[in-house]
Each structure stands twice: as structure tokens, then as C-alpha cells.
Image: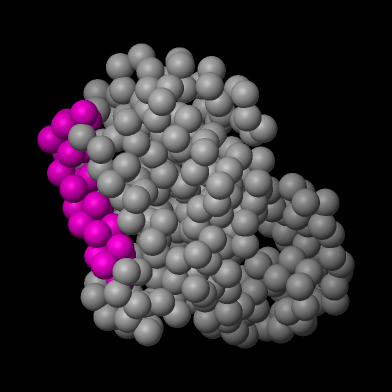
Amino acid sequence: MIIRSRAPLRIGLAGGGTDVSPYADMYGGAILNATINSFAFANIVPREDGKIVLYARDGNGRVELKSEEQLEINGELDLLKGVYNRIVRDFVKKPLSFELHTYVDAPPGSGLGSSSTLVVAIVGAFAEWLSLPLGEYDIAHLAYEIERVDLKMAGGRQDQYAATFGGFNFMEFFANDKVIVNPLRVKERFAYELETNLVLFHTSTSRNSSTIIEQQTKNITSKQEKSLEATHQLKQQAINMKEALLRGELSRVGEILDHGWKFKKQMAEGITNPMIDNLYEEMMKAGATGGKISGAGGGGFMMFYCPNNSHYNVKAALAKYDGAVKEFLFTKGGLQTWKI
């Protein structure tokens, strides 16, 4: 028997950073994101020899361990170990023996939520194998707690919920880890047009999102005025983007992205750099009307909104830079699990 799961990566369209504590706890956050046809995969093969074998197929990582109730968190495949530890602690109460194979379509530090999406996929695979009574909110919240509480990895809350629910979602974040996911009924022709006009570009750089998020958290905690006002503006950006997509006012999308990017850069140091700023300016000259960095910032993927047929010119201009355009399609589904 093999238990399989996959969960989609996401692109954040507006509100990025407002899902991070303490801002979400103090003021409430709002984010609009959409999942794409790139995935995190997890496959479990049960064993009966008292061993646990963990494979990260995208990073050539392999660990073979004795089956125990809790695995040591030591920097080796900790995301995989963290999920196992929590599943055993909360549900099984005894060691398990298995192989776990994982793969993610995007590298760590890409800004597409790859780490959190992988955690969701692994939780989903265990839930399928063990018939755990977990709904969508349960899986997303458990994945969030594994990363942010158990493994103490800095970050927000949107990625776990995007990967679990899938599609276009307007998410609201409150104190005490409360999250409300509002699926958006974006008409197909509007989604197709948005898909056509958005150009996703990998800058061939990665970043340590936790460093940026820690700075952002410090600025909010100290009520640094510039950073706080910027975060308020990004929350409003998510509301504006929701209205534009639902009404089909796609001519506003570039303007909303550009407005948000100006404020995003004020949230914390490291979100942008001269290379990113130059790239953004050049794509605006090539015909984009707005854009943003994906995720916390500092590297990874950037996206540009290119109305009419300007995406041809923007892609040609991007060819002069190190990196690659990533073609994508929006997806409607979230986490999927099955057995063979």
C-alpha cells in the first residue's frame, strides 16, 4: 500500500504580511491569495521492520532512524520529523514504521509557501493513512502549529490555509489563531484573464524569510509608525483586490499591486534590494502596470501584472536577467489524498 497526497502552492495577490503575529492579533489581518498548478507531494509506504526512513527527493536528503515516539529535531529534515512527532503525540500514542517520500515543485525560499505547503501535504498523508478525523480547518491549523509552535519557525498563517483549501480565497486573521477562509467566486473569464496577464518570474535568488519576518514583528511590536501604517495599507489592499476580482475590474489590478508594493517595502528592511528595485522599474517600462515580490521578500519569485498583450514585451525584457519565467495555471482544489 502507498498513501499519497499533494497540496498546491500559492501566489499572494494582496495583503501579504498582515497574517503575521502580532499584527494579526492586535489589528486583524486580511490576505487574498490563489493556488497554482505547482505542488508539494508526500508519499507514505508502511513498513514492519521498526524503522523510519525519510526521503526529501528534491534535496537528496535521506535519514534512516529507529522507530520511536518522538524523533530528534536536529536540523535534518525537521519538517518531516515535526509532523510525525505531532501525529504520534496527539493521535497515535505509539511509534510508527514507514517510509516518507516528499517532493516540492519550488525551492525553499521561493516565496510560494513551499515549506508550509509541504507540511500540509505530509499531515494530509498521515490523516489518510491513519483515518484521522481532521477537517480542512483542523489540518491547516495543525500544520500552522507544527511550524510556528513546535518547530519555532517564524512566519504567518496564510500558506497552510491556502494549501488546504485551494482556489481563490480572501482570508481574515484574528487573535488566538482564529482564521476565517472566504472562498471567492471569481468568474472563469476573469480568472483566465488574470492568469494570462500575470507574469511570474524566479529571480534565481532565495532568501531567509524568518529574518525579514522577525524584523517586521519587531517593528509592529514597537509600534514603529511607518511600518505599522504600511501594514494597515496592505490590509486595505486585500479588500481592494477582492472587490476588483469579483467585479471583473481587472484594469485596477496593476494599480492595486503597485500601490501595495510601495507600502510593502516599508514594512521591514530586506524586503527589497537594488536588484529587485531595478527589475521592477524595468518591467514597468516594458508595459507592466504593477507587481510585487512573492512571500516575505528579499528574493524568490516576483510577479508583474501585464494588461492587454504587454506580457510579451515583459517576458522579452525578463530574458535579459538571470532567472526564469514560470508558466502557471490557477487551481480550484486544495489538499488531495488517496491510497493505492
Which stretch appears magenta? 228-251
Outermost residue on the left side: it is 247
| Residue 24 visible within the image | no
- The percent position of residue 288, horizontal first and vertical second, equals 37, 28
The residue at 30%/63% (across/down) is: 230
Residue 307, position as x, y percentages in the image: 31, 23
In the image, 173 versus 119, the foreground residue is: 173
124 up-or-down from 193: above or below: below
Horizontal side of residue 49 vs 167, given as left or right: right
Horizontal side of residue 175 vs 97, given as left or right: left
- The majority secondary structure of the magenta stretch comes to helix
- Asked if the stretch drawn in magenta spans residue 160, the answer is no
Nearer-the-camera pick, 156 or 281? 281
Judge whether 203 appears above or below 336 on screen. Answer: above
What residue is rendered at 53% in x and 17% in y? 316
| Residue under the image location 32 percent in, 69 percent down | 226
Q: Position of residue 208 (x, y in %)?
A: 62, 62
**Vertical placement of 259 versus 210: above or below?**
above
Q: Where is the C terminus found, in terms of image quarters?
A: top right
User: Which quadrant would residue 19 be assigned to in this image?
Assistant: bottom left
User: Horizontal and vertical percent for residue 76?
Assistant: 78, 69
Dividing the picture into quadrants, the one containing residue 218 is bottom left
Q: Is residue 242 visible?
A: yes
Q: Nearer the viewer, residue 327 or 103?
A: 327
Residue 12 lies left or right of residue 82; in this view the side is: left
Q: Which residue shows up at 55% across the image and 51% down it?
A: 273
43, 294: nearer the viewer: 294
**As drawn, is 116 to the left or to the right of 71?**
left
